[in-house]
Amino acid sequence: MCGIVGYAGQRRAQPILVDSLKRLEYRGYDSAGIAVVGKGLQVFKSEGEIAVLERDMPEMEGSLGIAHTRWATQGRPTTENAHPFQDCTGKLAIVHNGIISNFMDLRESLEAAGHRFTSETDTEVFAHLVESELRGDLMEAVQRAVARVEGTYAFAVVAEGGEEVVATRLESPLVVGLGNGENFVASDVTALLKHTNRMLYIEDGEVVRVTKDSVRIVDASGREVTREPQKVMWSLEDAEKGGYPHFMLKEIFEQPSAIHDSLLGRVETLDAEPFFAGSAFSNVKIVACGTSYHAGLVGKYIIEELAKIPTTVQISSEYRYSSVSRESPLMVLITQSGETLDTMAAAREARKRGNKTVAIANVMGSAITREVDHVIYTRAGPEIGVAATKTFVTQLVALYILAMDLGSQNRTLSALAKRAAIGQLRSLPRAVQDVLNKAPEIEALARKYHAARDMFFIGRNINYPVALEGALKTKEISYIHAEGYPAGELKHGPLALISKDSPVVAIAVRDHTYDKMLGNIGEVSARGSPVIAIGFEGDTELAKFADDVVYIREIPPLFSPVPVIVALQLFSYYLARERGCPIDKPRNIAKTVTVD
Amino acid sequence: MKAVILAAGEGMRLRPLTVSEPKVMIPVANRPILEYVVEALVKNDVEDIVMVVGYRKERIMSHFEDGRKFGAKIEYVVQEKQLGNAHALACARDRVSGEFLVLPGDNIVDAQAIGDLLRAGKCQTALVAESENPSKYGVVTIEKESIRGVVEKPHEMISNIVLTGVYCLCDKIFRHIDANVAQGEYGLSNAVNASLSERPVTPIFSTGLWIDAVYPWDLLELNAAALEHLPARTSGKIEPQVQIHGPVGIGDETVIRSGTTIYGPVLIGDGCEIGPNVTIFPSTSIGNSVLVEPFTMVKNSIVMSNCSIGAHSYLSHCVLGYGTRSQSHLMAPGAESYVNISDEFFKVPHIGSIVGEDTTFGTGVVVEPGTVVGAGCKVSSGAKIIRNLPNRSLVT
């Protein structure tokens, strides 16, 4: 997972490239590099964050260039392995996001032809490949070179003395931004929003040549492609921290308005239009990765409750290689970015199997939205913090909406029950605001428990996946070893790990599993573990069992995951802050995973 | 010139409306009070703004972010403890030098008033206004076109000219603030008073607008004033047989159902469902995602986002905080009444009820005029509320 940017225009390329690169830092940040074409081809690379590159790089003149931020998948994160890579002549520079799977074969044949390699990476192969194919026109050379490459990629190439950036993609994202007298390429629109909101999305296999005043696209067979630019509505200011110390905290506090946006126009109490008129599904399969997978697990309980349709949830990378079942489920694919590689592949696989597909995605016009029959956008706005927060909560909102739709179509959800559910959805922003008002209390708890080495999160029923998500948040940003379990499973193993040094976070809202949860809390506190419970206001019973209680406002249990996860997000945020962790950029984790 | 907006305080006299947001964020015509201040500054090309924030600062930061949406460049300074407005200003001392504007974030001032202050072109000026109620403010005495003295909240009549809290000051003021703060005196008008001996302060009278909202009923007045300038913009879905008279703003994805009649000025936010057969009278603001069920009538009220008002209800001169939910037949009429705010009684010519956020009413609840119902209360069906309720009360 890496980020690439390119610029062809009239202004100095260097500051524009570095600034755009910073906006891609969420995609990876263990090394970075830049190449500018001016008097000759100037290349500089460095290990570490983009700030290091910015500090150490020399002034570069020229108004054409490319840059790269890297997250190592092949080769160590060192300066040698940083992009851009050059060919033997030093006249070409290339940057790459993705993986070249046949790079060993290519490297052997190129080495046999006399090419000398300076790094351990797959990317360098492409520089030499273009060199070997270069007979005057750079675009044609790239077309010939990619024909020999297997894998997933987005490449951008510049040449000494040239006036263009040539770029291409296969399964890795690539977008062209159109300016006045200047044009851009990037992995993601957020890198370019400062300069333009007119974007051309490049499709798989296409090669594009971008100069300061022209954009030419050809497809894999060399035919010219004409494409209308799309206007992107996100504005740059959406990506600024606005007074908050971290994007994650800003995004946590944006959740009431994100939920509002996500519901807007979708929850009329009367006459809402169904998504799939006339289709009845005997089962649903949700496929996703990471936090989106946890949203899917919650979605299972929601769909089974509101629509009474049996639902299974599978990790995308597992679904891809699963065997075809006899049933034809409704496939629900959840991905924030809309470009998660495994989920994309799952969408294609589902289509191949002839299933109806619906995607829940946040990024408008992203790759997956072109692979599925129907899209429910979460409308959370750009999420910069690597730890997903508002996108998770709005994914849940989308799942409630989907479940209500399925339920009213197969007549398990009466109009009256639907109206009640809509009332609950409409009041979710308030339930979340109430938790946000408790941030100082949660902060105090984090101060108390931040030194823990291990932590366990337990819950039952619909709050079991919320426990998993709470554990994921905690481990990914605070580096505390955290595990989530269904509370009923404690005695089947995890209890052995419980000690006075491992706090247990127990979600104990008053639902039909409440008494069992109290039993589990008793179980762990008897073994000396401090217990932090999350329960409904007015539940005095809970305080007798737990060391600390975070009270949330009472709400029907089916909707409780939303306020509960917000409490856990705040808890993990403050834990990480107390421990001095780099919250928006945890080590070894990238936000969007577009590689295998 | 930079402007410092003081927005750290809670605004206790507006409780229970300040449970989850400070006074400056309370919506007037569906926009926070503070937004009017920022807008007035930007209209005068004052774009560099420092906001001193404290109580529930996240609500401010999430709304304004870095200010670009509002044409401004906003930076934030946190006042950890709300010790008074001079102390608040001192928190921003690293961000200003030379001359700068100071404004309270919880008063509405318009571009004209700020323009008049700027056009005076002097350092150390203060926007002053005539007040019917000078004893609530710092009262000034004026001699030879400069302020001779300031008396804070005088008990006897000195003059009816009061400080609005809007100043153009220079950084020398910080010395006087430090000296005052050291003696436990945190008010800005006192620091200004202390500085008079060294540097004169010119009083500026303006024909522009300055309105202070101190008590909940002031919000209704502010709301009515703001709705006067309402640009009619209707979006959403309006069913047949809906009557709309006068300026009415209707937001995106809002549905106005058949048989509903609206007399403007009325503003309705995004994603609401109104009707069928609802009547809304001037001057009413309804926030986002609000549900108003059939046969309900709303008059001269502020209904904040996420409220739900059941069928056959009557609301007049009311302020309903965020997420107030009532079943059918909520009766909240307005009349002349004595309102109790922090154990002080105020005679208000026409007031309904003030309801804190997330309070729920059963069916057939009657709320007497002038009653303040706290936030998060649960009121059962058939109850009659005749006096103020603290937050989280249960009425069975």
Image (spheres, coloured by chain):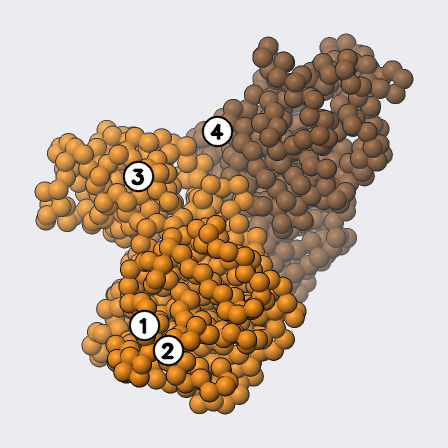
Chain colours: A orange, B brown
Residue at the spot 54% in from the left edge and 53% down from the top edge: A238
Q: Where is residue A585? Give x, y as percent.
A: 38, 50
Instruction: Identify residue type, mark 3.
Output: Ile
Label number found at residue A128: 2
Q: Nearer the viewer, mark 3 or mark 2?
A: 2
Instruction: Identify residue type, mark 1.
Output: Phe
Q: Where is residue B18? Give x, y as percent.
A: 55, 32
Q: Is residue B300 left or right of residue A591?
A: right
**Pointer 3 with pointer 2, Cβ within 8 A:** no
| Quadrant of the rendering where the N terminus of chain A is positioned | bottom left
Q: Nearer the viewer, mark 3 or mark 1?
A: 1
Q: Where is residue A216? Give x, y as percent.
A: 55, 81
Task: State the SS at label 4.
Answer: loop
Label number found at residue A534: 3
Calculate the distance from the C-alpha at mark 3 to the C-alpha at mark 2: 58 Å
Image position of A54 with respect to A572: above or below = below
Question: What chain does badge 1 belong to?
Answer: A
Residue at the spot 53% in from the left edge and 88% down from the top edge: A224
Question: What chain does badge 2 belong to?
Answer: A
Q: How many labels, in total?
A: 4
Q: Nearer the viewer, mark 4 or mark 3?
A: 3
Residue at the spot 33% in from the left edge and 31% down from the top edge: A447
Mark 3 and mark 2 lie on one chain; the one further toward the N terminus is 2
